[in-house]
């Protein structure tokens, strides 16, 4: 399956330079909220290094991790950006990160004036949709142990980089269940 790096590698150099001209490369400290729940976002991100997450907080203050983002993932509150609404999710760095930050309005303007950038956007959206569908399928078809094994296959050092309670929330299990899984798998 194609990934974001493949999409970026196939962008013609002149198109890449136009995209880069509206992007800002930034170093961001861990635990920085790039998008806040209940606020209107204006930016999209390409994660170059580090780990991010998107999550929401319930009325009772419980956090639910929706997704982790790894290097070369696109991140941002896309639904809120497209609909010009507030975000239902927080987008936060879990580790120190290097990101490209792009103003969504500027990006959409480029899409309207450049067919190659518009095609790039379409490819990126296809990938985001397929990734979302794969995650949803994993949640409904894999056991919690299988989901954990898949996560550590995708990101072997994740347990050393972020707290276990984030991993448990992402897997849709409790931290106690995660401990039991790790013990049973002898990890």
Image (cartoon, grey):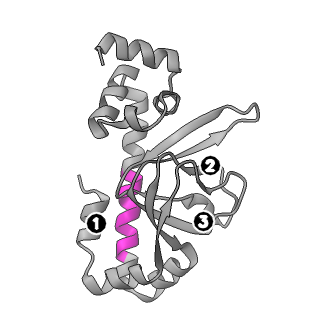
Report the number of discs: 3
The magenta stretch spans residue 122: yes
Residue at the (36%, 28%) spot, across then down: 147
Counting from the top left corner in percent of width and height, residue 9 is at: 24, 70
Q: Quadrant of residue 145?
A: top left
Residue 7's disc is 1
Which residue position holds label 2?
89
Residue at the (40%, 51%) spot, across then down: 50
Q: In the image, 79: left or right of 57?
A: left
Q: Earlier in the sequence, mark 2 or mark 3?
A: 3
Q: Nearer the viewer, residue 145 or 21?
A: 21
Counting from the top left corner in percent of width and height, residue 131 is at: 37, 48
Query: Are circles 2 and 3 on residues that touch, CB within 8 Å?
Result: no
Label 1 CA crowd tier, 10 Å (few <14, some 14–19, many 20+): some
CA distance separating discs 1 and 3:
22 Å
Q: Earlier in the sequence, mark 2 or mark 1?
A: 1
Query: Which residues make up the magenta segment?
Result: 119-130
Residue 81's disc is 3
Query: Are circles 2 and 1 on residues that touch, CB within 8 Å?
Result: no
Label 3 CA crowd tier, 10 Å (few <14, some 14–19, many 20+): some
């Amino acid at each position: 399956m194609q990934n974001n790096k493949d999409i970026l590698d196939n962008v013609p150099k002149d198109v890449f330079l136009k995209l880069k001209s509206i992007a800002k490369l930034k170093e961001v400290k861990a635990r920085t909220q790039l998008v806040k729940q209940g606020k209107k976002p204006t930016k999209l991100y390409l994660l170059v290094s580090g780990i991010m997450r998107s999550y929401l907080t319930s009325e009772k203050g419980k956090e639910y991790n929706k997704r982790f983002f790894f290097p070369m993932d696109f991140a941002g509150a896309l639904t809120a950006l497209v609909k010009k609404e507030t975000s239902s999710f927080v987008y936060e760095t879990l580790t120190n990160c290097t990101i490209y930050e792009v103003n969504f309005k500027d990006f959409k303007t480029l899409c309207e004036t450049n067919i190659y950038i518009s095609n790039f956007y379409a490819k990126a959206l296809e990938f985001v949709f397929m990734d979302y569908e794969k995650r949803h399928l994993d949640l409904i078809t894999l056991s919690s142990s299988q989901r954990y094994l898949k996560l550590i296959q995708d990101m072997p050092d994740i347990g050393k980089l972020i707290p276990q309670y984030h991993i448990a929330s992402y897997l849709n299990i409790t931290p106690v269940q995660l401990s039991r899984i790790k013990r049973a798998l002898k990890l």
